[in-house]
Amino acid sequence: MTKSPVAIVPPDVSIRNEAGEVLLFSWPEFVKAICEGSSCFVCGRPRAGNTFNDEHIVPNWVLHAFALHKKAITLPNGRQTVYGNYTIPCCADCNTEMAREFEDVISPLVRAGGDAVQNHVAGGGGQHLFTWMALIFLKLHLNDRRLRKHRNFNDGDDPISVDYTWEHMHHLHAVARAFHIGATVMPEATGSLYVFPIDAGERDFDLLTITDAQTLYLQLGRTGIIAVFDDAHAATTRVMWIIEKINGPVSSFQARELAVHFAMANLDLVNRPRFWTQVSADRKDVLIGGATGPEPLFRQYDQALFGHLMTVAFPVLPEVAGLDRDQAAARLASGDMNFLLDDKLEFVSGHARKSGFKADKGS
Ligand SMILES: [Zn+2]
């Protein structure tokens, strides 16, 4: 399920402004300082000689709002750690800047509940929220370099991130830190963002990453947010027919399935955008853009890929009427189970879900 990277190769030497701030990371410096070193992941300053404080990967106010400090997060290798300990090195200045730019704006919206986050996006805050999601996705994956990949130590001690191709992360990093250097980010350089209401009941926080598809799903209270970071909005185009069927709040399980549809659309995108960063000759302006085809082209629907992604999204299976655990797992893995739409491809509403999850055969 790996898609081929399409990115313009970064320069051999990082481009800095007169003050010495990095405007565009070279490939070697990005890998050495940001991916594999201990420099601040935003500005790139080294730990030595600078004040560092740890930045929570899931922002601290989210941990407070949903009482997550002592709860466990499942890592990409299947092991668990406690959210409150899940931090990444970041210099104090960048930490303060991110709090002011993002957390101080998004936190009151989430706490306000209802449509506040959707209204933020509708009012022009889409790129702001997208960047916030990009920062979380980036932090989640940069942090994995310090974690063992294999649960069984006999399997070797490569970090989880040995499976990542850092070139996918270079563009994401440029977009996520654009705020810090005042870069202009064109819409084609970003990706899909979808905000939607979630039913009360099952849980009030959820987080799912589908790494190869650069897809992050977050549930914050009754608000669901899905972001795809490298599709130049193509995934939204493909998933639109499903979104148009949804005529009410979705369940937490349905939200995870919706994230799978976005992820799959991104993996199936054939004519991938080419991303670039341009620095003006006077080193004052930075522009991050992307080139796309006239319209996105997708591979044919592959049920086996859908099944694979569903097993990633549902490590714990919801109860399915009439099926025992093994039968349900087999059907999920075959790609023949979904929670969003019924046999007639109509939305399974909250009313229909009340007697328990109804899993219907997909298209
Ligand atoms: Zn910094």
Image (spheres, helix red, strand yellow):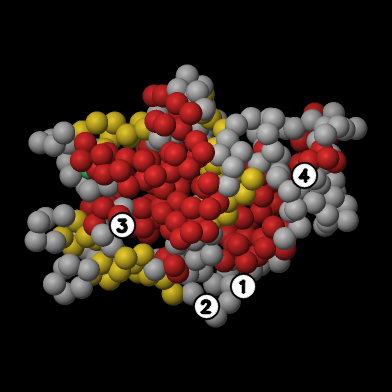
- Distance between mark 4 and mark 1 Cα atoms: 26 Å
Q: Which mark is residue 293?
A: 2
Question: Taking the image as drawn, is residue 320 in sight?
Answer: no
First in residue order: circle 3 vs circle 1: 3
Near mark 3 (Cα within 10 A), the count class, few <14, some 14-19 or many ≥20, is many
For label 1, the SS is loop
Rendering quadrant holding ligand 1: top left
First in residue order: circle 4 vs circle 3: 3
- List x then y, in percent, for residue 30: 27, 52
Q: Nearer the viewer, mark 4 or mark 1?
A: 4
In the picture, measured across the screen, residue 259 lies left or right of residue 337, that is left
Q: Which mark is residue 297?
A: 1
- List x then y, in percent, for residue 301: 72, 62
Residue marked by disc 3: 178
- Distance between mark 3 and mark 1 Cα atoms: 29 Å
Near mark 1 (Cα within 10 A), the count class, few <14, some 14-19 or many ≥20, is some
Amino acid tagged 2: Gly
* Whether label 2 touches label 1, CB < 8 Å: yes
Residue plotted at (9% across, 56% down): 19
Q: Which mark is residue 339?
A: 4
Amino acid tagged 4: Phe
Residue plotted at (62% across, 66% down): 237
- Distance between mark 2 and mark 3 Cα atoms: 24 Å
- Distance between mark 2 and mark 4 Cα atoms: 33 Å
